[in-house]
């Protein structure tokens, strides 16, 4: 279904996708859970997205602008390769269908606030006797235990409370969050790490397990450099803008037409940089002789370098520095990144056929698997699009179907 040309190295695989035959129940909304399940689906899993009748995943109506249909672009970018089943889990009829599904599942992912699944009677202790091999992952803001467990969990709060915002932005500026949802996406990736590890374990023992993944823990896990500095020196990490706690110069620099990024992260590159820009005197400058000295005098270092960098354009500097073996790059917008020669070569935009939208753009696969390349097998599902199909697979038909419908299990 992808209209994006696939690299020749990714063509021609006849091997099944790694997770073909694995069934995943996606009991999730918004971002971390749906994104986690989409990546499993990209690897071949049969992901059944279980949504509330009538409204569905609340992200379907999010983002403040509308497409041709009722589903937002955010939803369309996090739910490809899934089937949608509408099911009212607040009714006994709905739970009856759900329990039948659980018997067929390998993995379940949910991201409701801790306690909700227990209240519904579909938490891990309730489902484990039904399916002892079930790998059950709960994604939440702050985890299933601890004094903050009951708090609503969103990326902004996780970034703030984990410390990420304390090191983001410029020293004298107001609090700033990372420009992308690092807690949400990070948690999705850590959850997959746990899910696949547990699934591999299940293939050996037959036993599943419970996985507790949180935005807070995931955001804090990204703090390796900052906590290493703190634990090593006792100095509390602080905001540096685009600079770095470990080496200098390693940041955005001002050129004649704007900014670019560069890094001379060791003594060899530092000397090479000074020679390349025609400033050999900086090599012997007492403030900059070693990396610790350059870190201590970071502001003065940037001021000295920018005296030279402002004499030429950012693209000229990037080209010259790269030609000399010094890491450098432009500061792209998202359109520039996707439309770049490299972004196109890496297939980082895919256009997917959709029954209402015609086509929808999706971000391409971030990891390229050469033996079993991921595939777009299904468009992001319409709400309840596969309800009848999934029910038929469970053998639910005739009078039983009518009784479940009358009991409020799903919308016809």
Image (cartoon, rainbow, N blue to C red):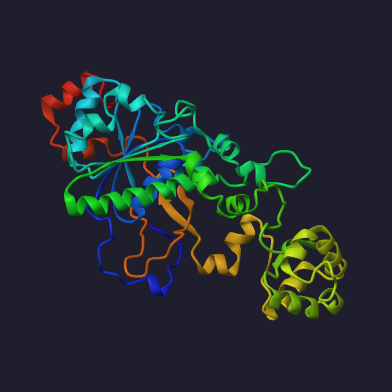
Using residue 393 as the reference point, say whether residue 57 is left or right of it: right
Residue for point 18% across, 54% down: 204
Using residue 201 as the reference point, say whether residue 143 is left or right of it: right
The quarter of the picture where the C terminus appears is top left
Query: Splitting the image into 4 quarters, where does residue 332 fall?
Result: bottom right
- Report the front residue among 183 and 22: 183
Residue for point 87% across, 77% down: 281
Residue 359 spot, x, y in % from top left: 46, 51
Query: Splitting the image into 4 quarters, where does residue 291 fall?
Result: bottom right
**How many badges with numbers are in the image?**
0
Using residue 165 as the reference point, say whether residue 370 is left or right of it: left
Q: Is residue 13 above or below residue 156?
A: below
Residue for point 59% across, 55% down: 225
Residue 154 spot, x, y in % from top left: 52, 34
Residue 244 spot, x, y in % from top left: 68, 58
Q: Does the image show residue 81?
A: no
Q: Is residue 350 above or below residue 318?
A: above
Residue 79 spot, x, y in % from top left: 40, 45
Q: Does the image show residue 221?
A: yes
Residue for point 44% across, 30% down: 146
The quarter of the picture where the N terminus appears is bottom left
């Amino acid at each position: 279904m992808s209209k994006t040309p696939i690299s020749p190295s990714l063509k021609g695989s006849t091997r099944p996708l790694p997770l073909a035959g694995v069934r995943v129940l996606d009991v999730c909304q918004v971002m971390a859970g749906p994104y986690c399940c989409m990546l499993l689906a990209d690897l071949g899993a049969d992901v059944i997205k279980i949504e509330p009748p009538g409204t569905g995943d609340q992200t379907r109506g999010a983002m403040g602008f509308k497409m041709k249909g009722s589903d937002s672009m955010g939803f369309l970018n996090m739910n490809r390769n899934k089937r949608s089943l509408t099911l009212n889990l607040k009714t006994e009829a709905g739970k009856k269908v759900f329990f039948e599904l659980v018997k067929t599942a390998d993995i379940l992912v949910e991201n409701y606030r801790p306690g909700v699944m227990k209240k519904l009677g579909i938490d891990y202790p309730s489902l484990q006797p039904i399916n002892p091999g079930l790998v059950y992952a709960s994604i939440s803001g702050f985890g299933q235990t601890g004094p903050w467990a009951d708090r609503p969990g969103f990326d902004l709060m996780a970034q703030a409370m984990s410390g990420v915002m304390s090191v983001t932005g410029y020293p004298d500026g107001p609090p700033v969050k990372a420009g992308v949802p690092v807690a949400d996406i990070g948690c999705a990736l850590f959850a997959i790490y746990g899910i696949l590890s547990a699934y591999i374990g299940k293939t050996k023992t037959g036993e599943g397990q419970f996985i507790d993944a949180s935005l807070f823990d995931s955001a804090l896990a990204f703090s390796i450099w900052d906590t290493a500095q703190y634990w090593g020196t006792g100095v509390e990490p602080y905001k540096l803008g685009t600079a770095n706690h470990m080496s200098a110069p390693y940041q955005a620099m001002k050129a004649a037409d704007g900014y670019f990024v560069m890094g001379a992260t060791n003594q060899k590159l530092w000397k090479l940089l000074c020679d390349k820009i025609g400033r050999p005197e900086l090599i012997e400058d007492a403030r900059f002789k070693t990396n610790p000295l350059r870190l201590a005098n970071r502001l003065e270092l940037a001021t000295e370098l920018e005296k030279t960098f402002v004499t030429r354009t950012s693209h000229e500097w990037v080209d010259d520095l790269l030609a000399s073996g010094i890491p450098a790059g432009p500061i792209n917008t998202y359109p520039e990144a996707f439309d770049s020669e490299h972004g196109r070569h890496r297939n980082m935009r895919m256009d997917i056929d959709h029954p209402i939208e015609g086509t929808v753009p999706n971000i391409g696969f971030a990891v390229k698997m050469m033996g079993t390349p991921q595939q777009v097998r299904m468009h992001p599902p319409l709400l309840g699009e596969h309800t009848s199909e999934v029910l038929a697979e469970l053998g639910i038909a005739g009078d039983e179907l009518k009784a479940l419908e009358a009991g409020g299990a799903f919308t016809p």
